[in-house]
Image (spheres, rainbow, N blue to C red):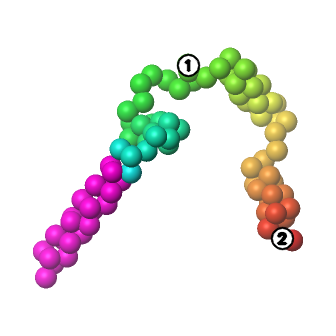
Amino acid sequence: MKNVAIREAVSMDISLKYRIVEKIIQSNDEILLNEIKSLVGLSEGDFWAELPAEVKQAVNKAKAELDRGEGIPHAQVMEEMKNRYLNR
């Protein structure tokens, strides 16, 4: 009985994998494909090197502000968003 359950789980797992591969092959969504590539570890190089200079500057500026204690804590932002959009 246990072997039957294992075979069914493996069969389902393989079926799911084939369906995922089929969707990937049919996709023309470059963003999705890049995300999948990154997710499965096929990305070449460092993403930071590929970012535009303006984005790097903005990230570095934000990091410096956080280091100086000028940021808003994540929990506070999430609470404000919850109150603004979910508690109407």
Element marked by disc 1: helix
Element marked by disc 2: loop
Circle 2 is placed at which residue position?
A: 87
For residue 87, above or below residue 61 = below
- Sort mark 2 into few (<14), some (14-19) or many (20+) by Cα contacts within 10 Å: few
- Sort mark 1 into few (<14), some (14-19) or many (20+) by Cα contacts within 10 Å: few
Residue numbers of the magenta segment: 1-22
Q: Amino acid at mark 1?
A: Ala
Judged left or right of residue 39, residue 57 is right
| Camera-side residue of 45 and 60 | 45
Image quadrant for the C terminus? Answer: bottom right
| Camera-side residue of 15 and 29 | 29
Q: Which mark identifies residue 49? A: 1
Q: Which mark identifies residue 79? A: none
Q: Position of residue 11 (x, y in %)?
A: 21, 66
Magenta stretch holds residue 20: yes
Judged left or right of residue 40, residue 18 is left
Image quadrant for the N terminus? Answer: bottom left
Q: What residue sits 84% from the left and 58% below the top?
A: 80
Q: Amino acid at mark 2?
A: Asn
Magenta stretch holds residue 11: yes
Q: Position of residue 18 (x, y in %)?
A: 28, 55
For residue 75, above or below residue 12 = above
First of labels 1, 2 by sequence position: 1
Is most of the magenta stretch helix, strand or loop? helix
Is any atom of residue 60 visible in this view? no
Query: Residue 25 appears in which quarter of the rendering?
Result: top left
Q: Position of residue 86 (x, y in %)?
A: 79, 68
Number of marks in picture: 2
